[in-house]
Amino acid sequence: MSGGSARSLGKGSAPPGPVPEGLIRVYSMRFCPYAQRTRLVLTAKGIRHEVININLKNKPEWFFKKNPSGLVPVLETSLGQLICESAITCEYLDEAYPGKKLLPGDPYEKACQKMVFESFSKVPPLISRILRTQNKEDCSGLKEELHKEITKLEEVLTDKKTTFFGGNSLSMIDYLIWPWFERLEALELNECVDHTPTLKLWMAAMKKDPTVSSLLTDVKTFQGFFNLYLQNSPEACDYGL
Amino acid sequence: MSDDATRTLGKGSTPPGPVPEGVIRLYSMRFCPYAHRTRLVLRAKGIRHEVININLRNKPEWYFTKHPFGQIPVLENSKCQLIYESVIACEYLDDAYPGRKLYPYDPYERARQKMLLELFYKVPHLTKECLVALRCGRDCADLKLALRQEFCNLEEILGYQNTVFFGGDCISMIDYLFWPWFERLEVYGIADCVNHTPTLRLWIAAMKQDPTVCSLLTDKNTFLGFLNLYFQNNPGAFDYGLSC
């Protein structure tokens, strides 16, 4: 099982030992959308893995040896190889592990997924800023920008005439963008998908996917986390445990 | 002469026809560093291609059907498929065409090259800002300091790896993806930013010996001629150095 519900490790914690053979380790945080990408791919591909949650408000000193930027997610193999950056970790897992390929084999279809990923790229920083903005005025400007970006994605999906962003089956690009859509309700941003019916259908289809639903976090838990996180509480990352 | 030595197409130009089979088309501009990446990969892999240069200050209306914001580079194949974003275009070419693979086969080594690319992300913006500041007579000491810091990070990587190139002892994709900005340091007036990074200077020297890099080197005077006209907002800048 994914074991993603373990308490986070913070300053003063003992560094974990090497990764046992046959397993891959992900340094994560239960509410991080970037780390969720990696956990989605690990789960979708049925890859045996262990999760070590990091207290992002009180980072262990040893974690900077895993990633000098101190960010999650990071993958560590039993050979001691470290892979950082969520999109890079996801692509690595798809290439290194057998079973269902999440990225298309066709070079053009693969390039299309990467172009959609680029169109999505303004969404995470916008949502981050909205989360941190207390001022109603600034917020409404940001929400308008978010609405524009989401409309672009609606157009992409409508043009494709398929259920998912990579075709009629769920694939890598859907997992890469999902975590932010999962958080819209908890952030009271559902209005941003009011005028995007194709995206609404996509969200409903995503929620039915066994991998997505196995990693879903409910609205109240997200809100509890956001509250503590914005107050810089070292308890935030373990909210709900 | 380089295969991209053709006049740019601007507003009012006739849209080009479909791409003939067996050829891939690149929409480009002779002095653009991002398009330069794609030209390096096309050349390195020996891919039959045609180049259409776009006048970036006077874009043809039809070009917005190739790219929503009229940016370059864009690849178009004979199936009318369009691929944009320089890094995506380069990876597409490596995947779609046979012969020499520029990205490693090993998934971890591939991931390493992509992580290296992340480390490079501030360089294009900083070099451009330095160029603009110098051309406008502004001080750019802070910008150069920031750029030197980025180069120090890259220097550290090469030192730690103890290899000639960023991907190992042979040139590979990551080196081609970095190269265009290093080629421009001198003409931008910021060559002194590698004064304290000897391993990076060795890499630059090794890159200049690569046949692909060599075949696409732009002569310094031609580049300066382009830059002069560009900063005077002359739409003829993009065709500087072309005969007739």
Image (cartoon, coloured by chain):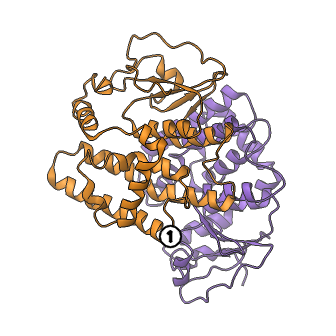
Furthest toward the left, the residue is A136
Residue at figure coordinates x 61%, y 82% from the top left? B9
Indicate whether A61 appears above or below A2.
above
Front position in the image: A231 or B9: A231
Rendered-image quadrant of the C terminus of chain A: top left
Residue at figure coordinates x 16%, y 55% from the top left? A137
In the shown orientation, is residue B177 left or right of residue B64? Answer: right
Q: Is residue B124 in sight in this rendering?
A: no
Shown in orange, the chain is A
Indicate whether A50 appears above or below B171.
above
CA neighbours of label 1 inside 10 A, class few (<14), some (14 to 19), many (20+): few
Chain B as rendered: colour: purple
Q: Is residue A17 in sight in this rendering?
A: yes
Indicate whether B217 appears above or below A61.
below
In the shown orientation, is residue A163 left or right of residue A126? Answer: right
Residue at figure coordinates x 58%, y 35% from the top left? A46
Task: Tell how many labels.
Answer: 1
Residue that badge 1 annotates: A161
In the shown orientation, is residue B55 left or right of residue B106? Answer: left
Provide the chain ID for the residue under circle 1: A
